[in-house]
Amino acid sequence: MAARRAASSILSRRPIPRPVAASSIGESALLGAGSARGWLPGALHRFSSAPAAAAAAATEEPIQPPVDVKYTKLLINGNFVDAASGRTFATVDPRTGDVIAHVAEGDAEDINRAVAAARRAFDEGPWPRMTAYERCRVLLRFADLIEQHAEEIAALETWDGGKTLEQTRGMEVPMVARYMRYYAGWADKIHGLVVPADGPHHVQVLHEPIGVAGQIIPWNFPLLMFAWKVGPALACGNAVVLKTAEQTPLSALFVASLLHEAGLPEGVLNVVSGFGPTAGAALCSHMGVDKLAFTGSTGTGKIVLELAARSNLKPVTLELGGKSPFIVMDDADVDQAVELAHRALFFNQVCRYVHDVLRAIALLATSFDSFLWFVLEQGQCCCAGSRTFVHERVYDEFVEKSKARALNRVVGDPFRRGVEQGPQIDGEQFKKILRYVQSGVDSGATLVAGGDRAGSRGFYIQPTVFADVKDEMKIAQEEIFGPVQTILKFSTVEEVVRRANDSPYGLAAGVFTQRLDAANTMARALRVGTVWVNTYDVFDAAVPFGGYKMSGVGREKGVYSLRNYLQTKAVVTPIKDAAWL
């Protein structure tokens, strides 16, 4: 078991960590034997600082989560079952490293069982054959059940993933219900066309469900990615085999049970928890799967494409990594820019629209009526504004105020009210982030805030800010996936556009300016899938999301996500003695 977990996952964001016993959690366990900071050079810690309140918050005794774990088995053909091998793996509380539960460990044999169930459900079952309105009603009932069980779902998401309870309960769970209602609304509005031909022919264009969809979701957005992927697939009439991330399997299993309670036929949705080299690779390679959708790292996305091509050339949708620029022009209100840049970087998930908070930091009057999903968490997001470009005229002021904001950020138990930042997902990600911090120091960037762990237990990291960052530095080029802000200086619009585009990624960007011409110029010149102007992380259900270049293939959300799960068929019939053509 330990050997399997230690192996590098080919279908996960990074190597899989070994489970850590509760008694071993502490600085020596995470950072090496001897000194708690023994593996990190002392230069890093000379700059490290954190306010006493934040340090205390991260060291308080963890709150007992107000929820029981009900589902730990695989969901196959409408039933929760053990893995064929009988094996399980531990899912860990990132606040402490303690084991929450042991979850069934699916592998290739379980993927075979799940695909067979999905294949029968699609080829022979009622789901694609019932009316679109009936499918709509099932998804609407599911959304209602999500709201009825919101407290349980939110607590599971916070416990398993480290997000704040205020966020999961008040923001993320409601958005899952919103997404499902959005796709329910599309179910009976998917239709084809009748097109004219150059002769006596009747031509129909049909949009048909694609079949069995294999879906792999990440650990940082398990609930939202469940909705982004399962929602459009089911609305189009498909069957699904979903592989959860091994770090956060609990919420997906719970909400999948609610879908069946809402009336979903057996076999239409199957959920397999497991690891990349076994369950993930088997799903991507399976000849019975008609479509793949994956969210995760760019490196893993390449493997998913390769496995799809080597099997049955199934189409693939990919939402991958990013190194998104956040550009602050010289006309910016620096206080507002600092706050928005802070929230664009130091987060894990996106959050709901809150009108009074929006008024406090919105930049333009027109922003007051838009949905703003504030970012409150741990920097673990693909579209984080992780390259903060600031005009030279306001650079020094911006750096000082960003430092102050980071030092005032409250890090601690995500079940406590008022906490802004919980722990990183696990020990492996924790150590990876601190290695990037050390790289920044070694390459000559100025560490002005943070740079160390917060507290002495669990996977908490201080909000970290680097100034004097250069484009060639590792921290400016690679996806850190943690609470590390890098601030770079620029002089002209032409310069910052060129530097912002000089990246293999193209997921998102933010532009902060009051000049309409500058905003329009950059919005069109930046080679990214989303440009937020004077806001950040606005994720309405109807707004497409995806990347240019190595940030992905295809789009999720909105009408564009439906195209991922439909086939287009032309039907041509001759017409005799037509009254008109």
Image (cartoon, rainbow, N blue to C red):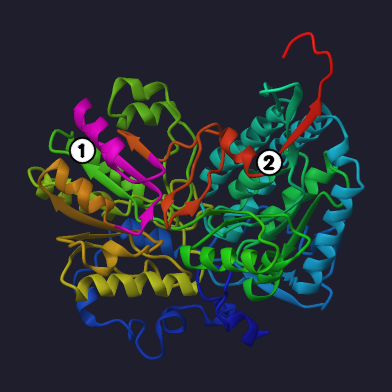
Q: Residues within 10 Å of mark 1 (few under 14, many from 20)?
A: few
The reply to whether residue 376 is visible in this rendering is yes
Q: Position of residue 58 (x, y in %)?
A: 42, 62
The residue at which mark 1 appears reads as 335
Q: Is 3 one of the magenta-colored residues?
A: no
Per the rendered image, the range of residues in magenta is 503-530
Q: Is residue 272 above or below residue 416?
A: below
Q: Position of residue 145 (x, y in %)?
A: 75, 37
The kind of residue tagged 1 is Asp
Q: Is residue 421 above or below residue 513?
A: below
The kind of residue tagged 2 is Gly
Give me the disc on residue 231: 2
Residue 529 in the figure: left or right of residue 2: left
Task: Identify the residue shown where x is 20% and y is 78%.
Answer: 43
Quarter the C terminus occupies: top right
Give the secondary structure at mark 1.
helix
The reply to whether residue 148 is visible in this rendering is no
Task: Identify the residue shown where x is 67% and y is 21%.
Answer: 196
Give the secondary structure at mark 2.
helix
For the residues labelled 2 and 1, the Cα–Cα distance comes to 39 Å
Task: Identify the residue shown where x is 41% and y is 58%.
Answer: 57
Q: Position of residue 295 (x, y in %)?
A: 55, 56
Q: Is 527 one of the magenta-colored residues?
A: yes
Q: Is residue 417 above or below residue 244?
A: above
